[in-house]
Amino acid sequence: MTVPKQKIALGLQYDGAHFFGWQTQPDQSTVQDCVQKAIWDFIGDPLAPIIRITTAGRTDTGVHALGQVVHFETSTTRPMWSWVRGINNFLPRGVVVTWAKDVGADFDARFSAFERAYAYCLLCSPVRVPLLDQKVGYLMMPPGALLRIDAMQEAATYLIGEHDFTCFRSAQCQSKTPMKTIYQIEIVNHFPKIYFFIRANAFLHHMVRNVIGTLLHIGQKKADPIWVQSLLEGRSRALAPPTFSADGLYLARVAYPDSFQIPEPFLEHGVIPGSLLNSFLSMSGSFSSSKVVN
């Protein structure tokens, strides 16, 4: 007799510094492999099929997640809280399941999502801070130096809306189209920390890090804000600044239609204030002009 399968969605948080990115790689520790193995180990049936999980977004090496979402199918029946505790018992340090939910057959962690939100924590400092290493991105600046925050904010306004973001995609990007829609970019100035928040329907490979690098290029007076418009029109990665560090980048949330009742991520984590994240994410589903908060 065939046992019917159920589809389960999981919320994940992880420290990207512990892994070689999300996607399975030979002879490397990846988030995908660790989570799939932990689920299979918790099921505890050597005859059970290998677990394959689908993710909302594949993060690069060093990129962290506060609100990653995945789904998998299984014939094993457990209470949802048991899935959370059980899988966590088999996960290594640096990754945790925050919630589990029985979802319908029509749910897909990737294709059901209508929005992704990222946050970036930048530390402007003349030296590195060991306790923050791999948790923040660094911009090495001499004492007394400042960024042109207003110029960065003005530059960000050119990115709002639907555009061809070829200039911000990596050569390895597998997206079928460079057309993406950015809903909001917010820059919060808590110098020497500066927080960037960006919401879009989806992102190209390295897109957020390339946007951050470009805004910082302008903030350091290396270009004027309107230069961003030229980058978009040029449609060439070679025109834009180098890809910025992955260390301070966090996948904050993946948004789904209310009908799926997907839980909200737990946002208190010590590097980016939860109050800032909650304020930013409350704008989900709508356009908002880029702005700077001092």
Image (spheres, rainbow, N blue to C red):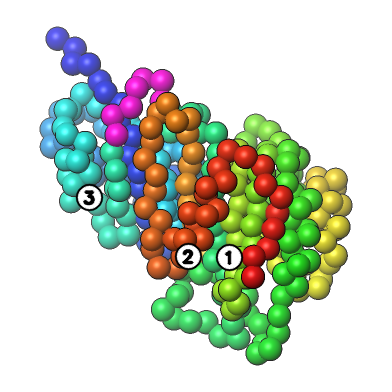
- Cα distance between the residues tagged 2 and 3: 24 Å
Q: Amino acid at mark 2?
A: Ile
Upstream in sequence: badge 1 or badge 2: 1
Residues at discs 1 and 3 in contact (Cβ within 8 Å): no
Residue 62 appears in the picture as rendered: no
The amino acid at mark 3 is Asn
Q: Which residue is mark 3?
A: 88
- Secondary structure of the residue carrying numbered label 3: helix
Judge left or right: residue 118 versus residue 142.
left
Question: What separation in Å lies between label 1 and label 2 (alpha carbons)?
Answer: 8 Å
Seen in the picture, residue 52 relative to 277 is either above or below; the reply is: above
- Give the quadrant of the C terminus: bottom right
Q: Residue at left 58%, top 73%?
A: 190
- Residue 195 got which mark? 1
Tell me which numbered mark, 1 or 3, is placed earlier along the sequence: 3
x and y percentages locating residue 96 in the rendered image: 29, 52
